[in-house]
Image (tube, rainbow, N blue to C red):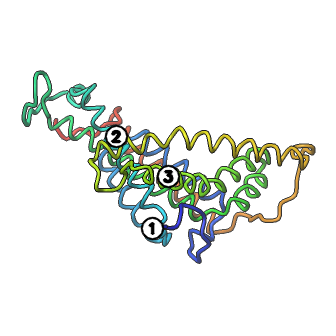
Amino acid sequence: MAKLLTYEKKDTWIDRLCGVTKLIFFLAWSITSMLTYDTRVLAVMFVISLVLFQLSKTDWKQVGGIFKLIMIFMIINLLAIFIFAPEQGSRIYGTETVLFPIAGNYVVTAEQLFYELNILLKYFTIVPSVFIFIVTTDPSEFAASLNRIGISYNIGYAISVALRYIPDVQDDFHKIRNAQEARGIEMSSKAKFMDRVKNTASIIFPLIFTSMERIDTVSNAMELRGYGKHKKRTWYTGRKLQKADYMTIAVTLIFMAAALVITYHDGSRFYNPFL
């Protein structure tokens, strides 16, 4: 079975950054991507995301399975947008360029396709940053770094536990999937696309119940060890912000400010090539 999406220590400049630095980048990157609908900005962010993904030396085997699930979700989301709001693009850009009709009031317009292209770019700018953050951030070091800058150790520890158990949740997913396939439920590429989507969705509820059992076990173990008794705690791992961290944070915030200025300079966050 392919390696799961989890932290793996590597000697790259991204790995050497403090966990707080990577969190600031991830939040700033995600906020910028969510706020802007400027295709030029999103295209630049998409290219930068691919470059950073390559520089992080993330093994595609770690993220390939999760990426396929995200792709399925993206396709469903784009289809839902078209089904429930087929004229959204025309309303946003103020024009209607009909490419071809489908049925009834459903027509495919250039404006709608361009609008959904922007949504697709948003996904492709955020998803690589999520992968990079997870596979290059040591959960213990990240929690210690958060506590070092004044954030409650309860919050830091909660995030640390969440990052640590991502591989376990994925492992449960694979076990449930294998059990379903052993019962004759086809989830491989041999099945039709919609059948694969439906069969994969049936895994969600068993996965939730399994995760709830794990949460109960972890919470009981923490309670038995007296977690939360004191206002402060010590950490085995921790990392101070270095010169590279400050430079990365500065470049990230400058890029975010520049992207938002370009996006909103004309009073709208939508880049309109149809005018």
**Residue annotated with mark 2:** 37
Q: Callout 3: helix, strand or loop?
A: helix
Residue at 83% of width from left, 48% of height from top?
Answer: 221
Residue at 72% of width from left, 46% of height from top?
Answer: 158
Between marks 2 and 3 in the image, the one whose residue lies nearer the viewer = 3
Residue at 78% of width from left, 65% of height from top?
Answer: 237
Residue at 46% of width from left, 49% of height from top?
Answer: 180
Q: Callout 2: helix, strand or loop?
A: loop
N-terminal-most mark, 2 or 1: 2
Using a 10 Å C-alpha cutoff, classify the residue at mark 1 as few (fewer than 14 neighbours), some (14 to 19) or many (20 or more): few
- Relative image position of residue 11 (x, y in whole percent): 59, 77
Q: Is residue 91 above or below residue 49?
A: above
Mark 1: amino acid = Lys
**Residue annotated with mark 1:** 61
Q: Report how far apart the C-alphas of labels 2 and 3 lie in the structure.
A: 42 Å
Q: Which mark is residue 204?
A: none
- Lateral position of residue 106 relative to residue 42, left or right: left
Q: Report how far apart the C-alphas of labels 2 and 1 lie in the structure.
A: 31 Å
**Residue annotated with mark 3:** 179
Between marks 2 and 1 in the image, the one whose residue lies nearer the viewer = 1
